Amino acid sequence: MDFSAEDYLGLTDNAIRVLEKRYLKKDINGKCIETPSGMFFRVAKAVASAETCFGKTPDETETCCRKFYEIMAKRYFLPNSPTLMNAGKELGQLSACFVLPVEDSLEGIFETLKYTALIHKSGGGTGFSFSRLRPKNSVVKSTMGVSSGPISFMEVYNAATEAVKQGGTRRGANMGILRVDHPDILDFICCKKDNNKLNNFNISVAVTDKFMEAVKSGTDYDLINPQNNEIYAKLNAREVFDTISDNAWKNGEPGIIFIDRVNLDNPTPLTGKIEATNPCGEVPLLPYEACNLGSINLGLMADETQEGMKVNWERLADVVRAAVRFLDDVIEINNFPLPQIKQTVMNNRKIGLGVMGLSDLLMKMGISYASEEGIKLGAQVMEFIDYASKYESVELAKERGRFNNFSGSLYDSPDYLLNKFAGKSAGIIQESHWKELGEKISRYGIRNATTTCIAPTGTISMIANASGGIEPLFGLVFTRLILDGTQMSEVNSVFKDCLEKRGLYSDDLINLVSKNGSVRHIDWVPEDIKKIFVTAHDIPPYWHVMMQAAFQLHTDNAVSKTVNFEEFATKQDIKDVYMLAYEKNLKGITVYRNNSRQFQPMNIDTPKQEAEDYNPSGEIKTVTCPECGNTIEMAEGCFICRNCGYTGCS
């Protein structure tokens, strides 16, 4: 089959560098022997080969291969990194996300450790809940010794991860989770105070609704011994919540998983409870479950029309349909690292179709991320993808059959989708359409237990030259640290195009923007550009959470999203965001205060003016918010108004 690279590929220099380092085939001397076009064709051919398992003819399979190649080569859609790396190769492990159980026995703990090493070797990341482990200093009856507790075993897993190079391309990543009612919860919350400890783990506290309500009321809550499910002790919920927030303020960890919310949306409750997520938190999974992900580039889903820039809904629907088929085919050809994982995946067939390039789309359409209009467009896009992905999954069920655990699942009710989205339409999909889809699911079933997920899209968004996931831009111009320590400077292409059209582009301006990533401090930049081209630190935390909530409503799994704070943000700001996330029914929340770690993958400088206005003396000042008139007492010179979200300096 003869494909022309010139027809599709116009990759940036940075994208090519990433592909050469991690994705393209190499000979024994480390020299690349594959082009980007060749990589996309390798992946398309391997994934499309699954079509023959369902009775497709060679011509039909080739047509499917061409479609898969097209959506990748045009960067309309890209699958997760293991699929790009391993499809069509001997390794053949294509999933990014796994969750493994950690049982309360030495045998179980180290059996899971062995499985973890195999997964990391194959290119996957792993998530664990350590909540089943007995607390430290518990008596071990078989030896009459005492248990060392969950954190000590996390350190063992961390060391093993360090020793295993992931698929020859990257080190493994882990998520460690502990329930907020575990007796060792305070030690867990503080276990990453030292940035040099557990550096192969992200950590999150699984908080319950009961705990959050106790935080609101300022009451105590029970710690439960997992050995016998008896009350171990009591702690004040507000004090524990403060400890979580204080540590997150210091270095971004721990995050929070709203575990009851996660299980409310568990599509297969009869098969077990969800305890953990993948390393970035966007995929809550059952033990021995995996999920393969892919993302649609929203920045390429809009076209210039006579009425201005508009979303091309027809193109988006076409890409969604192709992507869902692609991801279901990935399940069929995947070489799973463990038989238990293969069985669980085949029974549920979860896929996670998400997006990248949201910021690019908003900027192209002249819409600020931090606005009601921006939130509305985000909600409309995700509702459309959610509906179209499930519609296509039903079509696949007609061809291939429903997922095995359909009986007793949330979908085993004709009114499930209608009830879930009643009165919550973003204006794209009508309630009658959800009702009709529910009736089709009742008749034919659905192929995949989940269809949607919002991943962070770190390197695949670099390949696509797109903004990551649903994040705002970290900077319009910034330096990214990748791979072996390579520093890569990036200028957002939408921003650059706008400057060139307006006659404003110059190297001097780009250098000025690169100092802090933003244009908000440059007086002579037009106000409309400042409003549209906002970056993560220009946006009040309120809008970060609201955008995540807009996407979460129509995302089966979870949404990977970081709420970025300025360096001068307070601990109370962190707590306010956590509480807002709970009220908005998010499944998890991650915060990060700029420069709170010595090393971070993307960097911008602190704006000089704000650094001068910062008040390190701690003297309490009273200021009035110029936007809403709210009176604020603070110890910093700069503030975020918790009433309206206005950011300013006194």
Image (spheres, helix red, strand yellow):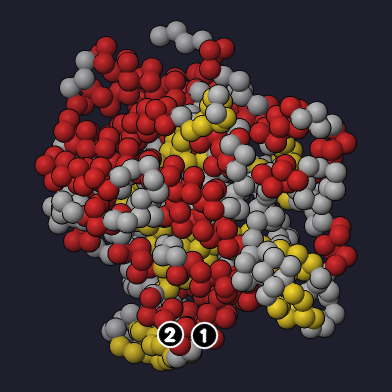
Total numbered labels placed on residues in the image: 2
Q: Residue at x 74, y 67 (%)?
A: 626
Residue 174 seen: no
Q: Amino acid at mark 1?
A: Arg
Q: Residue at x 51, y 23 (%)?
A: 74
Residue 395 at x, y percent in the picture: 22, 33
- Disc 1/disc 2 C-alpha distance (Å): 7 Å
| Mark 1: secondary structure | helix
Q: Amino acid at mark 2?
A: Ala
Residue position marked by numbered label 2 in the rendering: 214
Q: Dot 2 surroundings within 10 Å: few (below 14), some, or many (20 or more)?
A: some
Residue 112 at x, y percent in the picture: 37, 59
Quarter the N terminus occupies: top left
- Which of 415 and 296 lies nearest the eye of the viewer? 415
Residue position marked by numbered label 1 in the rendering: 238
Q: Is residue 497 left or right of residue 563?
A: right
Mark 1–mark 2 contact, CB under 8 Å? yes
What's the mark number on residue 483? none
Residue 63 quadrant: top left
Residue 37 at x, y percent in the picture: 52, 19
Residue 147 quadrant: bottom left
Using the image, determine if residue 591 lies above or below residue 576.
above
N-terminal of the two: label 1 or label 2?
Answer: 2
Q: Residue at x 44, y 51 (%)?
A: 551
Using the image, determine if residue 215 lies above or below residue 595.
below
| Mark 2: secondary structure | helix
